């Protein structure tokens, strides 16, 4: 346990000491919020109003949970780059020869990346009052553990990718190829209804889809929306034709995290 805490604490300290990284990690989510929320918000609201007669639909409120999820995804995955950096500078070799088990090393690195992403996600929530988005206190308390769980799932993915690669350039290339399709095929920025069958299949397999949907059902009062609006905005998520429940999404993300941590641990043992 001490080994997990030490590795976890080291990554958090590195993050808070790197101020340019803290500021720069906000650039992409805020850019997407401006382009999609402000730039395309009026057009999307008009389309929804024309198709459902819903005059009070707020598109910025719809995509903001997706923007927060995107922050968690990008920050947690790119924070896993520290695995390769630690390997290059010799720190990883030191902890691999220590009594700390490979499983504890993987969990410590995952928790470090997830904590960094969680902090970034919470900082994004500061924008809510300026965007006219309101959330009650109970929903806010529900949101925090869900955000950390989502960050852990995405950090485990980044950890697995980092454990398989040997260079920072290769990691950045692979992650960029993975991240953008995962964002666009998750419903984070626009609804994913009436898509071709092959796109629906990829959306169903995409773990980001369930994180985004979970965030939306906490941050948006979905029950107050009409069935037509929920259908139009893709808020009735299904898993191969079966309705998805909150408990099902939580179990999926926890299982996804555990599986990737196991695979990353096996990769550490094989390569080192």
Image (cartoon, rainbow, N blue to C red):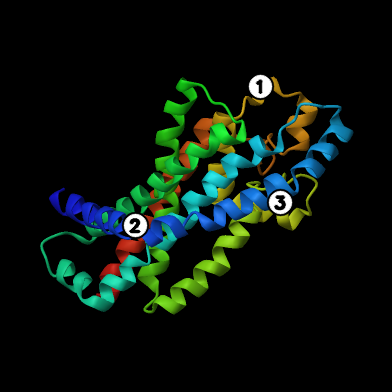
| 77 horizontally vs 188: left or right | left
| Residue 122 falls in image quadrant | top left
Which one is closest to the eye, mark 2 or mark 1? 1
Where is residue 168 shown, x and y percent of the image?
40, 76
The residue that mark 3 highlights is 200
Residue 189 rendering spot, x and y as whole percentages: 66, 48
Query: SS class of the residue under badge 2?
Result: helix
Give whichever of discs 2 and 1 has the lower sequence position: 1
Asked if residue 268 is positioned above or below residue 204 in the image, the reply reads: below
- How many neighbours does mark 1 have within 10 angstroms: few (below 14), some (14-19), or many (20 or more)? few
Instruction: Tell me which residue sits at (31%, 50%) in the image.
Output: 111
**Which one is in front, 23 or 56?**
23
Separation of marks 3 and 2 at Cα, in angstroms:
28 Å
Seen in the picture, residue 61 relative to 134 is either above or below; the reply is below
Q: Nearer the viewer, mark 1 or mark 3?
A: 1
Q: Nearer the viewer, residue 157 or 19?
A: 19
| Separation of marks 2 and 1 at Cα, in angstroms | 38 Å
- Callout 3 touching callout 2 (CB < 8 Å): no
Q: Please, is residue 119 above or below residue 28 in the view?
A: above
Dot 3: element? helix
User: Which residue bears the numbered disc 2?
Assistant: 262
Residue drawn at (27%, 59%) of the image: 14
Whether residue 186 is visible to the viewer of this picture, yes or no, is no
Judging depth in this view, the residue of 264 and 8 nearest the camera is 8
Describe the element under mark 1 as helix, strand or loop: helix
- Pointer 2 and pointer 1: residues touching (CB < 8 Å)? no
Tell whether 119 sits left or right of 228: left
Q: Earlier in the sequence, mark 3 or mark 2?
A: 3
The residue lying at 17 percent from left, 54 percent from top is 6
Relative placement, left or right, of 129 versus 18 is right
């Amino acid at each position: 346990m001490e080994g997990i805490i030490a590795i976890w604490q080291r990554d958090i300290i590195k993050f808070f000491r790197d101020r340019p990284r803290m500021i720069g990690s906000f650039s992409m989510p805020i850019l997407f919020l401006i382009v999609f929320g402000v730039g395309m918000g009026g057009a999307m609201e008009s389309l929804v109003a024309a198709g459902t007669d819903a005059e009070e639909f707020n598109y910025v409120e719809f995509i903001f949970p997706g923007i927060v999820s995107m922050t968690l995804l990008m920050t947690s995955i790119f924070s896993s780059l520290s695995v390769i950096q630690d390997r290059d500078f010799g720190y990883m070799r030191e902890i691999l020869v220590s009594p700390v088990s490979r499983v504890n090393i993987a969990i410590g690195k995952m928790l470090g990346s997830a904590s960094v992403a969680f902090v970034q996600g919470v900082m994004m929530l500061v924008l809510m009052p300026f965007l006219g988005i309101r959330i009650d206190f109970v929903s806010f308390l529900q949101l925090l553990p869900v955000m950390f769980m989502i960050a852990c799932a995405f950090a485990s993915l980044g950890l697995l990718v980092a454990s398989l690669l040997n260079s920072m350039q290769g990691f950045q290339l692979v992650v960029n190829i993975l991240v953008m399709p995962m964002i666009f095929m998750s419903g984070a920025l626009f609804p994913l209804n009436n898509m071709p069958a092959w796109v629906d299949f990829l959306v169903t397999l995409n773990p980001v889809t369930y994180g985004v949907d979970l965030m939306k059902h906490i941050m948006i009062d979905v029950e107050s929306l009409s069935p037509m609006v929920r259908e139009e905005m893709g808020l009735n998520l299904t898993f191969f034709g079966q309705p998805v429940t909150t408990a099902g999404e939580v179990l999926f993300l926890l299982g996804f995290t555990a599986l990737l941590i196991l695979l990353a641990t096996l990769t550490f043992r094989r390569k080192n």
